[in-house]
Image (cartoon, rainbow, N blue to C red):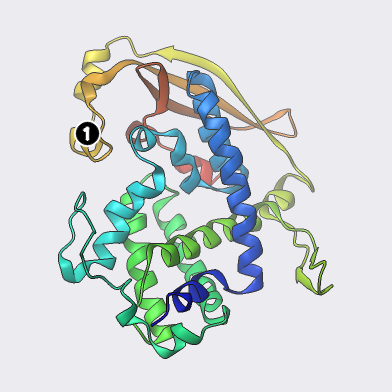
Amino acid sequence: MAKTKKELNTKLYAVVAFFLVLAFLVSVCAVTFKNKYNAFHPDKVATAFTESIVNRGDGYNSYKNTLISKNYKYGDYIREYYMYPLIYTESNYKAGMDTEGLKGFNDESYIGDKTASDNGTLSGQVIDKMYPYYVQLITELNGWDNYNTFFTKYFAKLLEVREEVFGDKYMTDEIMFTALEANVAAYGDKLVGTEDVIDENSNIKTSTKTIGIYENKYGENCVFTYEAVKIDDVNDLEKFKESLDAATLKTYKVAIDDITEAKVVTVQVKAEGNTVVKEQKVTVVKIDSFWYVDNTNTDTAQLYNFYK
């Protein structure tokens, strides 16, 4: 079956989902550029990490500031540990295996009639059906600190929902990222609100203005500001390194002995520049000349609850 069928399924999804993902990808590009500069400064790394979570409830994207991204492109880490094991189930895929020559559910032989003919409507339905489950996981797990459970459950559910909608087992990493990132973007919109969006070609309204949770609590057009108000050295570095989860860091391809410094940065989150709504302690570590958030020692649950 022609490969154009595959692209049709994953790129021409519902119009609203398109705008959600487009906005998300623009923000990702900006964050990626900013992260490269921030990495030289422990306070900036900690602040950027906190800002990513609070601004749009985006714990997913915040991991670009962490040890996970030291030796991985973040997306590659997610593929290797959470997507490929589901896509290549029948090939008994294990993290680190070469996928060349492996047959998985991304093979065109799994494409059914609905996948082949989808104009984006069914793909949009999958995204919409996954959103309540996304919110459920964020609520149950108090955010993204337990990313292992989040990814494991979310992608397993996605396989079920997509098969229910499309009637086949076809699945690719692109489908997985599309659904997840659309849900991340939609969750952010619920927090900050949206404006009316009019398609300039058709003059059709594709998105309607909504009032976000933040606006209801802190006022319309509320802006959060962030400041690293305290930086504490971890004086007993050896004891700190002994407390680290070596098995988890091994999945990041990070050697504990490569860590040469560690600090705890206190970041204040203010609403409208004056009211402190939270103080977040962020553990950061230095490897070579760069600083990374030690997500294994940073509890961010309060950042997902302060607006409730």
Which of the image's four quarters has the N terminus? bottom left
Residue 272: % across, % down: 75, 34
Residue 289: % across, % down: 40, 16
Which residue is depicted at the point 78% across and 46% down? 219
Q: Which residue is mark 1?
A: 245
In the displayed structure, 176 sits above or below 97; it is below
Q: Categorize mark 1 by other alpha carbons within 10 Å: few (<14), some (14-19), many (20+).
A: few
Residue reaching furthest left? Answer: 92
Residue reaching furthest bottom? Answer: 113
Total labels: the figure holds 1
* Amino acid residing under circle 1: Asp
In the displayed structure, 46 sits above or below 103; it is above
Residue 201: % across, % down: 81, 70
Residue 274 image-quadrant placement: top right
Judged left or right of residue 278, residue 219 is right
Q: Is residue 308 visible?
A: no
Who is closer to the viewer here, 80 or 286?
A: 80
Which residue is depicted at the point 30% across and 57% down? 82
Who is closer to the viewer here, 146 or 118?
A: 118
Residue reaching furthest front? Answer: 2
In the displayed structure, 302 sits above or below 157; it is above
Residue 260 image-quadrant placement: top left
Which residue is depicted at the point 27% across and 52% down? 81
Residue 234: % across, % down: 35, 14
Which residue is depicted at the point 49% across and 72% down? 7
Judged left or right of residue 189, residue 211 is right
Numbered disc 1: secondary structure: loop
Who is closer to the viewer here, 164 or 35?
A: 35
